Image (cartoon, rainbow, N blue to C red):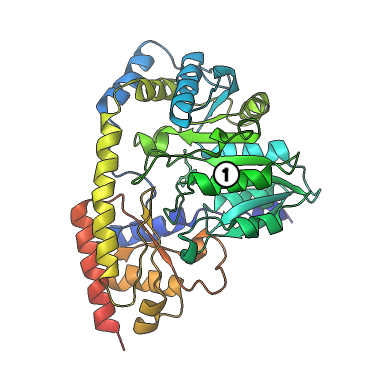
Amino acid sequence: MLEISERTKNLGTENAFVVLKEVNDLVRKGKNIVNFCIGQPDFDTPEYIKEGAIKAIREGKTGYTPSSGIPELREAIAEYFSETRGIDVKPEWVVVACGAKPFIGYTILSVTDYGKGHEVIYPNPGFPIYESLIRAYGAVPIPIPLLESRNFSIDVDYLEKIVNEKTRLLILNSPHNPTGGVLDRKTLEQIADIVKQYDNLWVFSDEVYSRMLYEGEFTSIASIDGMQERTVIVDGASKTYAMTGWRIGFAANERLADHLARWVTNTESCAPHPNQYAALTALTGPQDDTKKMVESFRKRREIIVDGLNSMEGIRCLKPGGAFYVWPNVTEACRLVKAKDSEHFRSRLLYEAGVAVLSDIHFGHKNEGEGEHVRFSYAASEENIKEGLKRIKAFIEENSI
Ligand SMILES: Cc1ncc(COP(=O)(O)O)c(C=O)c1O
């Protein structure tokens, strides 16, 4: 019999794509759905960026590039990282890939060995690909709980307890998907103090939402004394410039750059040539579109947080960044007799025509945390208001 490997059978996924298929099937059948599932800006890529790619195509920039990316783009990224993180990043330390996502796997592969018991700490709830790839690549996933009572920040005492000599990698994600939580400088300094006690402990700092911050200034752990050399800084064009489909992400680390580039050679070869020019245009062009986009997310954040908090059975913290909210719906589940957040999610979709994701799509439930769902508010104000109206009516009509 032709067998499928255990590794593949056990491979995790991003359930956003699975739920999206469910949503699309309903839409095809004529059902009207307000969609809060999608983790991408609802804006089109700005015209000047598209023009950058079109010009590159016309000039024949359509071939393979060096695996680490075209030199002009690596320079622009080095400058961007240096300016926005307040550190010195050289172009040789930068690698470009097809999105930020591939760097999750490349970094795990670069700093852990299969089956050696190397541990990787990752946020829970969190972007599901972290745990999926840690497991698939033969390392040991160690979740660190992000709790509502701590504003979804990291409990450094807990971190101190779970880090040990076998820990090879700490994955951080701020601003955070799915909670919108932000790690402030003080917390990052405390994390850095723990990390620096271990000679062989790397940090993967997933900063893809670094520009979507609503209060204060963005801080990268790489900017804390002694942390840059062990931190892989990761960002990308997807969220910042509404370019998810262009597949351009970038990472920087002096020691790892050549190794990450070799993983690119072994897998993608290189990021698409014209798209690298689009990213170059984005990084070096006017930043007004990004600013406008972030301002509209800020406004929508107010609408969705206030709207959810005005509903019986829902409690929602105001997130500091990204474009997600992670309301507690424990009481709403009880009111409508949904057995858990996943049942609640499914009923919202089929009975109320509102698509969200549930906490089981972002890892294991943390004890005592209750039920949560995730809304992406990268949706128009009109749709947000309509979605909120439907949820309110659903809860009222189904309450016991
Ligand atoms: C936390 C986080 N990291 C990485 C990614 C992947 O981004 P990219 O499109 O650059 O691969 C996402 C996308 O949703 C994300 O939420």
Kind of residue at disc 1: Glu
Q: Residue 128: percent from the left, percent from the top?
A: 54, 54
Residue drawn 70% across the image and 36% down it: 110
Ligand 1 within 8 Å of disc 1? The answer is no
Q: Is residue 320 left or right of residue 300?
A: right
Q: Is residue 82 left or right of residue 157?
A: left
Residue drawn 43% across the image and 68% down it: 372
- Check the image and report above or below for 138 versus 313: above
Residue 143 appears in the picture as rendered: no
Res. 264 image quadrant = top right
Which residue occupies the foreground of this view, 359 or 145?
145
Q: Residue 28: percent from the left, percent from the top?
A: 29, 57
**Residue on which disc 1 sits:** 189
- Check the image and report above or below for 255 versus 245: above
Farthest residue in the left direction?
382
Q: Secondary structure at mark 1?
A: helix
Residue drawn 64% across the image and 60% down it: 158
Res. 374 image quadrant = bottom left
Q: Residue 130: percent from the left, percent from the top?
A: 59, 49
Residue 204 appears in the picture as rendered: yes
Q: Residues within 10 Å of mark 1 (few under 14, many from 20)?
A: some
Quarter placement of the N terminus: bottom right
Quarter placement of the C terminus: bottom left
Farthest residue in the bottom direction?
400
Q: Residue 166: percent from the left, percent from the top?
A: 78, 49
Number of marks in the rendered image: 1
Residue drawn 41% across the image and 20% down it: 277
Farthest residue in the top direction?
59
Which residue occupies the foreground of this view, 233 or 400?
233
Which residue occupies the foreground of this view, 142 or 350?
142
